[in-house]
Structure formats: structure tokens, C-alpha cells
Image (tube, rainbow, N blue to C red):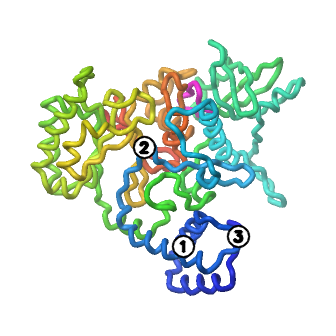
Amino acid sequence: MHGLSLRSDASKYMTDVFTQVDEGECQEWLDKIIEIIQKQPLTSTLISKVICETAVQECNAEHDDESDKVFTVIDAFSVPRFTYKKDRKKFIPNSTLGIPPPCLHGNAENKANLFRERYTILEQRTLRHDLFTPPALGSAPSDSKKFQLKPIEYLLGTTAKLGEVIVLGMLTQLKEGKWYLEDPTGVVQIDLSKAVSFIKSCPLSPCLFTENCFVLAEGWYEDELFHVNAFGFPPPEPARTTRSVFGNLNFFGGQSATSVKSSSKLQQIEQDNSDAMFIVLSDVWLDQIKVIEKLRILFSGYSGFPPTCFVFCGNFLSAPLGSSHCKVLRDCFSKLADLLCEFPDLIKSSKFLFVPGPLDPGPSTILPRPAIPKSVTDDIRSRVPSAIFASNPCRIQYCTQEIVVFREDIVTKMCRNCVKFPEDGDVPTHFTKTVICQGHLTPLPLHVSPVYWSHDNSLRLYPLPDLIICADKHDPFHSSSADCTVMNPVS
């Protein structure tokens, strides 16, 4: 599968190694060894015994440290970066392709790649869906109707009236009041008059169709206009399906070279700690006496049974204070450290994760936001060693569970930028399906939700995590789709 071959002495050595491994763990060890070998500067596809010995030793060292990987917080700026290669139908690490690390303020090529890569991920995912998979040669005819995706250049390259076709593209307004569909091959103006009535009447499409989201549009092309009868989102794909196609690649990030989902040791730790808890709070206004009093009650209640982690999301002050904002926030964190020092069992057994909000100190409101500066948090860091200040969004890996924490008032922004707001159903369900189908935390125009072009991958949800914590000012909700749960703890 990887184009590698073993020399005879290497083959004998590997056979001896695997006789000592339990049969159920063979595949996991094999994936790790191949991953390590691929990272070495190979001069040939013929693998020698020396290379195998080095890989096995490194693998053993990683396995010994696996117990340290039970809880990991992954910064948005350190998320692994992959590029999908259509000819090989697999994701390749950017480091292997020789692509240099991203700079914060990218160039025009980075902006183009931002949308191109979003499209590529959704396209390969859609083409793998049952509705778009052509029947295999010699297979029995299926009752379900099959569809075929067409690029926009297919529409533009013909003058005749086409029958019904399906196009995957990004919904955008290149001119005010006129909607277009765009993909890497071209752009076409669309007529949404019939599609809007479809959204209104169809109970199967409870989603928020926002500008710059990707849609599957069905219709016909005539007189340089694509008349859309109906459109919906690309079908979602559960994480287990994605991993069955791409193996144990670690898309999520963390210390492990491969996905933690395949670790039998972490699975066992997770089963042994089935009562582990995460406490999630949003808009923890540390300048409010009432909030500090309630935190004291919370900490005293949990001091006898320390949870795994307290997740505190900003904003950490109730209002912006201008030039004195950082000084006041520093004093508030010091008061929080005083409070935590009253509960040494919590400090010893629990983690305290702080995720910045839109009004907390930091460079502008562009996503992803870095952690709150150390100049503001150095006091609480020194007194509470288990305090972790992370970026927004950030990722948490607990045993084999993958969690994304995002502090942004994104629900209102998405509702405000809808092409047509759905009249039926509840907003949380619409929001959940939109985020999961788009595979992205902010499927919005860049002027509405600015993103660092080179770091857009930190906002992608592929493969889908187990839990998305969207700390929003919207009412609390809890919704699931495609084996992924989206919840909002509310202010």
C-alpha cells in the first residue's frame, strides 16, 4: 500500500518482533512503524534492517509515553496540515510535500487555497457517498437512483439547453443582489427563485444556507443562467467512515503520530474512568462579585470529586475597559488564583483550561485567536500549575475522545447571513447540521467572520470530532448528527 519493500534480513527481524505482539494490536503497531519509517530520509523504497530497528525503538519509546497522552490540549496554530491528492486519493502531510510552514499574514495564493481546500475536502467526501458512487462492474442493479456531479466548466462549455444536472459549488454574491455558484473551474450566475420555495416547503433540508457555504445545486442551464430547482448541503460523513478510508492519520493533532482512536491502551484507560467529568462555563466574568461567589460554591461542591477539567470560556470581563483592560484582567486572574488555592485537591487533580472570548486581550478579532498574553496570566500560571491558556478555537483530546472548543457568537452571525431563513424547525438543529455538513466552524464570508488565510485548517471539522462545544450567547442546546454532538453551555 505504501510502496515499500523489505530486505530479507529486515523481513526476518520484523517477523521476530511481531511474534511478541498480541494479535489484536498488530495492525496498530504496524501503522505506527510505517508512519515512523516514512518520516525518515529514505533513499530507496527497499527498507533495510537498520531502518526497521530504528523505527521499532522509536515506537517503543512512544508506547511507553502513551500514558502521558490521556489529556492533551491542542493549540489552533499547531493543528496538523494535510493536502488531498486526487490522483492518489489520500491526504499527504504538507511537510512531506515540502510545503513551507504558514506565516500569519498570508498572500493572495493563501486566500485562494483557503476556499479551494474547503471545496476539495467536501468534493472527495461527496463523491464517496452512496448516491454519487457509480455501481461496480458486474454488480447487481440497484433500486436507488445514482447521481453524477458536474463541474461548472461543464455548464459554461455548452450552448445547448442541458437537462437536470447537479453541481457542487460555493454560494457567493459577486455583484450585489445577484447570486453565483463558484468552484475551482469557474463561476456561473444562478436563479434562486424556485430554490427558495423549495427551502420553504422541504422538511428534509433544515439548514442555514449562508453566503460562502458550499451547496449541491440541482437545475438546468440556459442563456448563461443556471436555474436552480433545489439545493442542499453535501452529505455528512461520520468520523469512523473517514478513518476507514484514510487509516490512522492523525488529523486532529496532539502528541501521537497516529490517531488515538486506534490506541487500545487509551481505550482501556477511558473505560476505567467512565465517570470522568468536564465542567464547561462560558462568559466567566471575573470582575463580578456574584460570579466569584458562585465559583466558590462550584469549587467547594466538586472538591471531594475533582473533575478531569474545568473549561472556562471568555469574555473574562463583563465590559471592555479600554487602556486599563489588561491590568484589571490581570488582577481578576490573581483573585481567581487566590480562590483556587483554597482547594488544593482541585489544583492537584483537575486541569483548568481558559479559552479567550471576542473581547479578551489579543490581536484583533480574527480567527483563530491566540491565547491570552502571558503578561496578563503569569501570576495565575505560577500559582496554579494545572492552568492552561489555549487559543480560540482549541482542541482537547481526552483518551480517545476528540473535543473542539469554540468561543464565538456564531449562531447569530449565521442566522443573519442566511440566503433564506428556514421557517420551520429550531435554530440549534439547523446550526448543528450546517456546521457538520460544511465541515467548518465558520462557513461565512471573510468580512463577516475574518480568518487568517493560512490557518483556516484549524477551523475545519474533518474528520468530525466527538464533541463540539460552541460557547455562544444563544440559549443552551444539545444536538447530534453523524455521530457528532454539538452543545452550547450558554453564558
**Residue marked by disc 3:** 45
Q: Give the range drawn in magenta.
A: 205-214
Q: Distance between the residues labelled 1 and 3?
A: 15 Å
Q: Hey, what amino acid is under mark 1?
A: Ala
User: At which x and y percent is residue 348?
Assistant: 19, 57
- As drawn, 448 above or below 12: above
Prevailing SS of the magenta stretch:
loop
Secondary structure state at the residue bearing disc 2: strand
Q: How far apart are marks 2 and 1 (CA)?
A: 35 Å
Residue 327 relative to residue 464: left or right: left
**Mark 2 or mark 1, earlier in chain:** 1
- As drawn, 186 above or below 126: above
Badge 2 vs badge 3, beta-carbon distance below 8 Å: no
- Quadrant housing residue 132: top right
Q: What residue is shown at x 68% (from left), y 22% (from top)? A: 180
Residue 221 relative to residue 50: left or right: right
Q: Hey, what amino acid is under mark 3?
A: Thr
User: At which x and y percent is residue 205?
Assistant: 58, 33
Near mark 3 (Cα within 10 A), the count class, few <14, some 14-19 or many ≥20, is few
Q: What residue is shown at x 29% (from left), y 31% (from top)? A: 315
**Residue marked by disc 2:** 468
Q: What residue is shown at x 27% (from left), y 22% (from top)? A: 320
**Residue marked by disc 1:** 55
